[in-house]
Amino acid sequence: MIVLDADSDDFVIVEGLPTHTRPGTLSLSFDGTHLVFLARQDDNSEPMRIVLHSLATGGRWEAEAHEYRQAALAVDGTQVAVLADASGGTAMAALGSESVGVILIDTATAKPRLLWSTDGYAEDSSISWSPDGQLLAATYLTLDDVLTTAVLDLSGTVIGLYPERVALPGAHSVWISNREIIVYPEPDDVSPLTSLNVSTGRERHFTRRSFDGYLAISGRRQVRRGASAGQFVTADLNDGDERPFLTFEPAMDIMALDTVPSNAGTMAA
């Protein structure tokens, strides 16, 4: 796993991570100082654990993860929001089988609290905080096999439910303002990205010219694979103004990507 410091423009290999990290769960904290991810125990056994890893010191905070699938650290660092799937067990007593839920974990006490749950599964899932820390967006699969994104406030009230709309898995690839999210349609065929204002219900559909797949959204720009192996580019949300982003030699692929616009680091694994 590597981190790119946007101030120094240097790549850094992150040392000391657990061997059995789940790459698809990697994200950055809002201030770019910590990695957030799920990992198995060092002997590859269960239960899973949530790990906050300090990029400066290598220090860790950990909590048992059980059936948790995705995690995102709150803006102020006091809570971790996790998307939990109890279809194969019981993440919490209050979360039944064939249920998906959002759980908040206090980083001071490691105590979990069930915020919201519904019937479904955490497949192709995503969890993210709004920039002001007041809302959460979670993508999950319903029992009818419909990928759906729900937007919740901190009381657990659903303020928006968007069937066949999918958020990218990166914790900072979803919200482009305090009340506006970026999603793509499911099934993902030739349709463009869409912005949804969760307060007004207004939708804006962008233009799509490339079909290489979306890796991340940052600063109202998308990140995707370029024309050659190992090349990654950015483009605006209308798929124009393409610019070089990263090039790896020898060529390699990115399994997970997260970016923080301010105090920035770019994370790729």
Image (cartoon, helix red, strand yellow):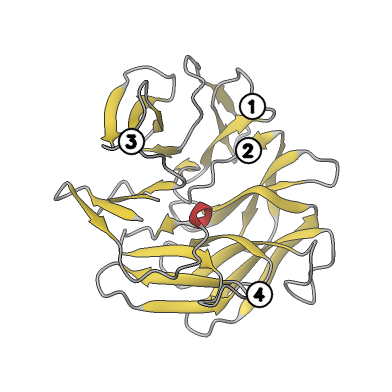
The residue that mark 1 highlights is 188
Callout in the foreground (2, 4) = 2
Where residue 174 sits: x, y (%)? 50, 43
Amino acid on which disc 2 is placed: Val
Task: Please tell me how many numbered marks the rendered image carries.
Answer: 4
Q: Earlier in the sequence, mark 2 or mark 4?
A: 4
The residue that mark 3 highlights is 251
Q: CA distance from mark 1 to mark 2?
A: 9 Å
Q: Secondary structure at mark 3?
A: loop
Q: Is residue 89 left or right of residue 114?
A: right
Residue at the (29%, 67%) spot, across then down? 55
Q: CA distance from mark 3 to mark 2?
A: 29 Å
> Considering depth in this image, is 199 or 214 the residue closer to the camera?
214
Amino acid on which disc 4 is placed: Arg
Q: Is residue 212 visible?
A: yes
Q: Is residue 161 visible?
A: no
Callout in the foreground (3, 1) = 3
The residue that mark 2 highlights is 166
Tell me if mark 4 has few (under 14), some (14-19) or many (20+) residues whose alpha carbon lies within 10 angstroms of its own: some
The residue that mark 4 highlights is 113
Q: CA distance from mark 3 to mark 1?
A: 26 Å
Q: Secondary structure at mark 4?
A: strand
Tell me if mark 2 has few (under 14), some (14-19) or many (20+) residues whose alpha carbon lies within 10 angstroms of its own: many
Above or below for 70 versus 45: above
Amino acid on which disc 1 is placed: Asp
